[in-house]
């Protein structure tokens, strides 16, 4: 199967045509990204700063680069000049650093707060209470160069669809709860990034607006 065929298959299976696709190209060579680009993809997801740094200049300038992996504060400065959306913000410290680097470049950086929804404790993220208190804190209100676009979560890696669905539903419920607060800083709070190759259909049924799909498009990673 070619990347083009995989893309067609993935996109035609979507439960919600308004849900947007981020093609997760981590570990894949530039030729594969170009093939996806030529098939119309503009949103690419990577999980390593170094890889983003070398791939970005190799691709056309209208690519929207999504940082989907765990981001260390000391590496923020390398991606802030070009990144489109940072999905995995999981601490106030990181949020402050993104704000600081955004300010230096006079660029407002779009981010998603990562929420820990999985049963496994290996995955990063805030819990619901932490997100709610962060968004209502004074420290958050002082951040002038970040825009919180929404939430991101990863479900448990399991065959149990009910569990995955329950976790996605919980993330969407938190998203709705935050929107009801109608905070003035959250005028652009509109994204729920959830769903990967194995669970994007469930995620879409539960209200995902952005799915991050890698192996179903580019094939298995080594
Ligand atoms: C790798 C990765 C994906 C894509 O995973 P696939 O199962 O290959 O679709 C999505 N989200 C994050 C955060 C990832 O690290």
Image: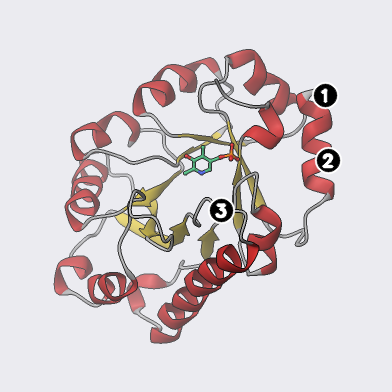
Q: Are marks 2 and 1 in contact (CB under 8 Å)?
A: yes
- Name the element at disc 3: loop
Looking at the image, which residue is at 28% across and 76% down? Answer: 129
Q: Which residue is mark 1?
A: 1
Separation of disc 1 and disc 3 at Cα?
Answer: 26 Å
Marker disc for residue 9: 2
Quadrant of residue 184 within the rendered picture? bottom left
Q: Which residue does the image show at 61% across and 51% down from the upper left?
A: 211
Q: Position of residue 179 (x, y in %)?
A: 45, 79
Quadrant showing the N terminus: top right
Judged left or right of residue 139, residue 57 is right
Using the image, determine if residue 161 lies above or below residue 22.
below
Cα distance in 3D space between marks 2 and 1: 10 Å
Q: Is residue 140 visible?
A: yes
- Tell me which label, 1 or 3, sits earlier in the chain: 1
Report x, y in % for residue 185. Answer: 33, 72
């Amino acid at each position: 199967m070619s990347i083009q065929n995989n893309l067609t298959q993935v996109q035609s299976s979507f439960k919600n045509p308004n849900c947007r696709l981020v093609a997760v190209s981590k570990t894949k060579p530039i030729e594969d990204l170009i093939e996806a680009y030529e098939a119309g993809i503009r949103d690419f997801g990577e999980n390593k700063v170094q890889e983003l740094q070398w791939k970005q200049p190799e691709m056309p300038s209208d690519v929207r680069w999504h940082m989907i992996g765990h981001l260390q504060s000391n590496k923020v400065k390398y991606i802030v000049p070009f990144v489109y959306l940072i999905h995995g913000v999981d601490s106030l410290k990181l949020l402050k650093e993104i704000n600081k680097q955004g300010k230096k470049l006079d660029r407002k950086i779009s981010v998603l707060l990562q929420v820990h929804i999985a049963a496994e404790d290996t995955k990063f993220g805030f819990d619901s209470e932490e997100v709610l208190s962060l968004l209502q804190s004074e420290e958050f209100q002082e951040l002038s160069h970040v825009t919180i676009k929404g939430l991101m979560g990863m479900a448990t890696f399991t065959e149990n669809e009910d569990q995955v669905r329950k976790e996605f539903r919980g993330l969407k419920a938190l998203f709705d709860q935050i929107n009801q607060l109608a905070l003035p800083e959250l005028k652009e709070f509109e994204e729920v990034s959830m769903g990967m190759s194995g669970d994007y259909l469930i995620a879409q049924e539960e209200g995902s607006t952005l799915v991050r799909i890698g192996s179903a498009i580019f094939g298995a990673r080594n």
